[in-house]
Image (cartoon, grey):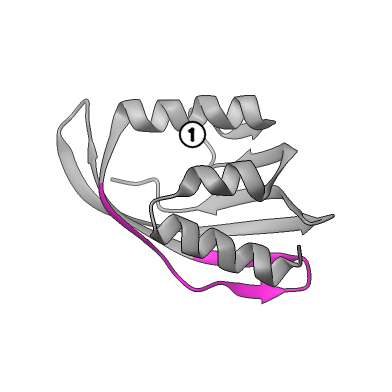
Amino acid sequence: MKTEEIANNLVAWCNAGEEQKCYEQLYSPNIVSVEMEGSEHQISKGMEAIAKKGQWWQENFEVHSAKTSEPTVADNWFSVRHEMDITHKPSGQRSTMQELGVYEVKDGKIVREQFFYNTEE
C-alpha cells in the first residue's frame, strides 16, 4: 500500500470507530509508538506493547466521541489531528483533547507513530 492509501484508511477506520483494523492491517509488527515525555507508555515497541498501551487507555479513559482529520501526506510520512471528548475514569474529569499524530510508512506498513499534545492540565 502507498502512504496516501494507508493514511486514508487510518482516517476512515478511526472515524468509524474501527481502530483495531488499523493495527491489524496497516501497522508493522515492529511498530514503534512514541508518546509525550513523562507518559506512562512513552515508547512502546511491537504489537504486544501497543496492545498493553491500548488496554491502559481503556482502563483509564472513557471516550465519548472522537474525530480524525484528513491526512497531510509527504513522501513516506503523514500526519492527522485526533480530537477526543474523554473522561478520565479515576478522577471523573471530562475534557476535550487534541493531539497531532505523525506516522512513518515503510514497505507498505506504518513503522512509527508519534503523538504531540499538551500535557498541562
Q: Label 1: which residue? A: 39
- The kind of residue tagged 1 is Ser
Residue 26 part of the magenta-drawn span: no
Q: Is 118 left, or right, of 41 in this rendering?
A: left
Q: In the shown orientation, is residue 91 left or right of residue 58?
A: left
In the displayed structure image, the side of residue 55 where residue 110 appears, left or right: right
Magenta span of residues: 64-80
**Residue occupying the point 62% across, 41% down:** 24
Main secondary structure along the magenta-highlighted residues: strand
Q: Is residue 26 left or right of residue 115?
A: right
Q: Quadrant of the C terminus?
A: top left
Vertical side of 60 occupied by 64: above or below: below
Question: Percent position (x, y) of residue 72?
Answer: 60, 75
Badge 1: residue crowd in 10 Å (few <14, some 14–19, many ≥20): few
Residue 50, position as x, y percentages in the image: 58, 32
Residue that appears at 72% across and 67% down: 3
Quadrant (top left/top right/bottom left/bottom right) for the N terminus:
bottom right
Residue 117, position in %: x, y? 44, 53
Which residue is painted at 70% across and 48% down in the image? Answer: 112
Residue in view at x 50 percent, y 74 percent: 70
Is residue 69 rendered magenta in the image? Answer: yes
Q: Residue furthest right?
A: 107
Vertical relation: 76 (above or below) 63: below
